[in-house]
Amino acid sequence: MKQYEVFELELHGDRPEGSDVQIDLQAEFTLNGKRTKVKGFYAGEGTYIVRFYPTETGTCTYRVTGIVEAKGSEECVSSGAHGMVKAEGTHFVYENGEPYYPFGTTVYALAHQTEELIQETLETLKKEAFNKVRHCVFPKHYDYNHNEPQFYPFEKKEDGNWDVHHPCFAFWDHLEGVIMTLGKMDIETDLILFHSYDRWGFPFLSLEEWKVYLDYVLRRFSAIPHLWWSMANEYDFIFNHPLSDWYEVEAFIAENDPYRHLLSNHNGMRLYDFSRPAVTHCSIQTNAMHMADIWRERYQKPVIFDEFCYEGNVQHEWGNISGFEMVNRFWQACAKGAYATHGETFYSEDEVLWWAKGGTLKGESRNGSGS
């Protein structure tokens, strides 16, 4: 067991009856007198996994109960890792006290591309300075986003509807692999849990179905340190879910994440209420960079312009600013004590645009020149 890294117990038993998500599997870890209760998850083929995220060194004892059982102890040693990113005032720090300055980019459908394209994207990221990537759990359907993903998050019922109680384990293994690879590159995943750009029906699941899905996400991913929760991309464009549903989603995440990862909600037209206690930072779509200090003062939380238009040449007004203008908007945000997120939308005949699918970067802004 290593401080600031995922500790995992793999156990084996019969497949659960009924739901593969809402299973009776929990554990209590005790480290230096501090007790942490977590839920385990089913990973398929009779495999159950319990994960723990230790933030201190010392002797850790654990007890697993429920559908499978185990107990034992592990010595937690220092790993040299810097831990999770946390909000501190209007800025960010790692758990070891080092400052964290988010310099992010957006690749919405990163995990839903071919293995070849994913690897090309990861190789590109290795050469760049980005330390955060916004990407989605669900596949995306929009302009230049028409490919079918290799996997879907759930199996289907006999009537053709999604069965949130039966995850497609190949999907989750694959998504987890992308997240973990980014983490090894010291890149935070800003994981977008919902969005409206869809032809498969995921936004139209009921609130209760959403909670089952979130239960699996939280059981499986909460112990991963290099992860943020973005409740949605443009939450207010998912018209069939009222604001009260988003408050329930927020509460469910806060109540079921034992490690309190960063949590926010990205807007289309209407800003989310960032004053809410569980919300850790302001994730904002707008080009009103001059508002940064006003929002910092109002919410007393970090402000990130996660979308303020993209450097590119597509027909949409949000996707054709110059490299110079993107750098200019970054500077405006930084001058006001806020942060900004890069995006790129240069047209390509193969429809591989960075903002959606990744690949290689073509613009100038990421180098800070924007000439």
Image: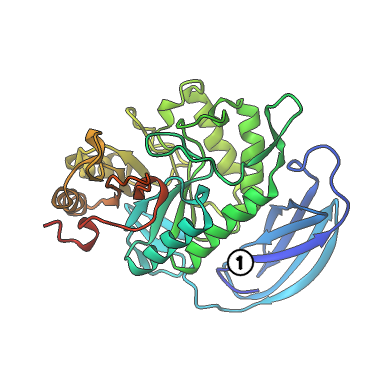
Q: Where on the picture, by quarter, is residue 30?
A: bottom right
Residue occupying image coordinates x 66% and y 44%? 216
Query: From this viewpoint, which residue is outermost toward the right?
Result: 14
Quarter-of-image position of residue 47? bottom right
Query: In screen coordinates, is 157 left or right of 193?
Result: right
Q: How many marks?
A: 1
Question: What is the residue that sits farthest to the left in this orientation?
Answer: 371
Q: Pick the residue in front: 105 or 100.
A: 105
The quarter of the picture where residue 54 lies is bottom right
Read off the residue under disc 1.
54
Residue drawn at the location 80% of the way across and 59% of the way down: 64
Is 334 displayed left or right of 149 in the figure? left
Kindly identify the amino acid type of the residue bearing the numbered disc 1: Pro
> Is 246 positioned to the left or the right of 210 in the image?
left
- Front residue of 144/273: it is 144
Q: Residue 226, how many percent across, how many down?
A: 49, 60
Front residue of this view, candidates 35 and 310:
310
The answer to whether 192 is drawn above or below residue 77 in the figure is above
Q: Is residue 265 above or below residue 341?
A: above
Q: Left or right: where does residue 54 sit relative to residue 126? A: right
* Image coordinates for residue 325, horizontal then vertical, percent: 15, 48
Q: Tell me the residue at 27%/40% (across/down).
A: 295
Residue 213's x, y, as percent?
Answer: 64, 38
Give the quarter of the figure containing the N terminus. bottom right
Position above or below: 222 against 33: above
